[in-house]
Image (tube, helix red, strand yellow):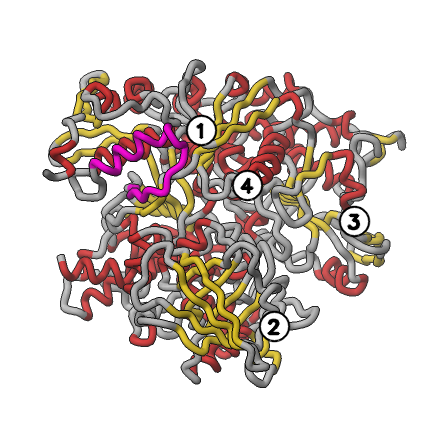
Amino acid sequence: MTARETLPDTRRQLTIGKQTFEYFSLAALQEAGFGSTERLPVTLKILLENLLRHVEKGFATANDIKTLLQWAETRQSDHEISFMPARVLMQDFTGVPAVVDLAAMRDAVAARGGDPERVNPLNPVDLVIDHSVMVDRFASDSAYEDNVRIEMERNNERYEFLRWGQEAFDNFRVVPPGTGICHQVNLEYLSKCVWSSDSEGVLRAYPDTLVGTDSHTTMVNGLAVLGWGVGGIEAEAAMLGQPISMRIPEVVGVRLQGRLKEGVTATDLVLTVAQMLRKHGVVGKFVEFYGEGLDDLTLADRATIANMSPEYGATCCFFAVDEETLRYLELSGRDATTIELTREYSKTQGLWRQSDSQAVYSSEVALDLGSVEPSLAGPGRPQDRVALPDMAEATRQQYPDHKKHVVAMDHGHWTLENGDVVIAAITSCTNTSNPAVMMAAGLLARNALAKGLEVKPWVKTSLAPGSKVVTHYLEKAGLQAALDQLGFNLVGYGCTTCIGNSGPLPDEIEHAIDKGKLTVCSVLSGNRNFEGRIHPKVRANWLASPPLVVAFALAGTTEIDMTQDAIGKDQQGNPVFLKDIWPSTEQIKAAVALVSREMFTKDYADVFSGNEAWNAMPVAEGATYTWNDNSTYIQNPPFFAPDMAPVAGDISGARILALLGDSVTTDHISPAGAIGRSTPAGQYLVDKGVDPKDFNSYGSRRGNHEVMMRGTFANVRIRNEMLNDVEGGYTRLMPDGEQISIYDAAMTYHENATPLVVIAGKEYGTGSSRDWAAKGTRLLGIQAVIAESFERIHRSNLAGMGVLPLQFPEGVTRHTLGLDGSETIDLHGLDKVTAGMTVTMQVHHADGQVETVDLLCRLDTGDEVSYYQSGGIMPFVVDKLLKA
């Protein structure tokens, strides 16, 4: 008996207006006696529907469905299921290499006699170009136009390639540069809550779900759209119709009660949630919010919380459909059928938020919204919340003594000191999607101007909204002019400072930082603040709400208690305190009331059109891409080359390329930010005739593996414990012990056919879902990464690139083994790889001593084993296409 035959027929019909939709009914399962869904969290109901709908395609079985229905009994499961998202979302940093890989796959299919046009996204893909604009120009009326012009010139090769992809691939749309941030565009325009499509001649309705090549894809969970970030390779598999394998997740319930106090923002709330859930432990888990506290949280507030799921380690952070969801769909311009379908489908399927829900959770935590206080997070991790009154002391802890240096610029002389703010940026989808905090920033700016306050001259200010709607409503409220006067002029619609595209500081400021060895700060309304991410000269980075970003720009320092200390003086020389310029809740609500549906419909009417420069670009023709060997942006990657063949059997005599500590992020591993002239990547570009001023960022060159593999493990703040007190991408070349770059060492080992491993501590690979953290690892010849624990996305990416993730047993670390990098490593038991198996490691010390340790294989699913054995997802998919 087949899986299909053991299941009841759950197909039902739902009529909305003149349209009739078929759907797979969860209630029908219970009616047929197959199992009850009443105690399942909403997110698991969505996964259940996904399984039910894909049984026909062989991606799910009756046993999968039965096991998921039984989840409420144990509230955890090791059972593996498949997930087929409705669509895929990309940004250009991760999207360009994904399209490069698709082009390479077309070449590989053609080389083996197949039809290259069979390589196409089977699910809808939207790529939003939002990660390439940099803050080159700021604090001027022409900043936006100048930055977009520079962006187009700087990224011409990449954008021409994307134009080819837009024409060559089916099911692939591109939102051109200068439009918005992918997560905000997704929230405000692309998402539908309930998706519908023609399937075999039937109009079928089902939950809108997605995966994205950015960890902050989770933002849209605030709109009741289930989705999360995956690596570029995993996203490619989803695009090509391959299911995403996952264990049935644990689900943590968060009960909200009360309401936020006067003067407390959604940013303060999300920083509190990040700290609370990181402490509770939600890594790799789903999180669902419920409770009466949701009654007073706007959709934008929910999206702000959902956005930062990666910062507390959750796979996603979900808010079920309710009247607020429908209100937002109406406000943001969705059509009447979409809104009514969302209402009726959600209620019919039991996906509607209910006050009397019987859902159970793996664990629960409660938060009284009234306990939230104004806060920042930093100076290097988003979960390290600091209450506003404690900022002065938190800043002083970052340096042992008080240093300062005199700065001379065209418009004056002043003293730059430790703790001073040199970057103040209202940026990133986390907060610019929220009208309340954006209006609050504008109101605070207006109030500050009325008091005669000015931004300190050493502060680089910028405003980079996530969509044009933000500009529309700030102008409507008359607040953009006030922000402009303080230097928070529009610099572009993109991620900018939050991803390290903060642009250069004035030469005099950088000179003072270097000369005085100063610890200076950035304050930004972003979600990431890892050291070295925002700007290489800025060590301390603080996350804050947009109005606090403006306030700290006025103060010019983070060594201040804004609840007690004056941030400046008025025209009469009287001290001005934060409370004197902070807008009231009622003032903010009045400004937010100006946001209208017409703003969304107007600004998104031409979302795919692009500017004049974009539309003037030549579009290459052909099913396969004509690679330009001279390009320093786009190159055909060698993932199908003979020396990229999968590892077969045990690994012997491996050298340790890097010995790393705890919380090594994908920012440390993956190339990101500016390219230094003296780095291997910089030397490669110079050899190619590129002037250092035209290096651009690593992110913009993700389509060129030659640049990216040279920048892997090359972060200026990474510390390889094989070296003493050395920062940056260096290692010791064994057996002689010479200090050289990690790239040069890897190439030397490659010439000698020496396999490589990386050894690390806890939480390896936290942070953004940077695909090049795994791709670069593979291209350097690293065959295994051995760590105390892994972040979910990066571990999966390693498996997807054919790199073996292995985990130390409890109590065993690089320290207990006494590793210093001089050892060689053998890995046994790999002749027959299975998920979760034991792999035996032998450590051969330089003195001849040998130690044996059993490691846990962190290939967690059968699909991951298949990818590893094929040498990665791309060869796996090509083989499957050619065999079909």
- Observer-nearest of 456 and 345: 345
The residue to which callout 1 is attached is 361
The percent coordinates of residue 74 (x first, y second) are 39, 32
Q: Which of 616 and 119 is in front in this view?
A: 119
| Residue 828 falls inside the magenta stretch | no
Instruction: Specify the label residue 256 is tagged with.
Output: none
Give the secondary structure at mark 1: loop
Sequence-earlier tag: 1 or 2: 1
**In the rendering, at what x and y percent does residue 200 appear?**
12, 36
Q: As drawn, which residue projects farthest toward the right? A: 573
Badge 2 element: loop
Residue at 54% in and 56% down = 667
Q: Residues within 10 Å of mark 3 (few under 14, many from 20)?
A: few
Name the residue carrying label 2.
Answer: 820
Is disc 1 in contact with disc 3, using a CB cutoff of under 8 Å?
no
Q: The residue under label 4 is which amino acid type?
A: Tyr
Spatial separation of the CA atoms under disc 3 and disc 2: 31 Å
Residue 195 in which image quadrant? top left
Which residue is the site of mark 4?
Answer: 312
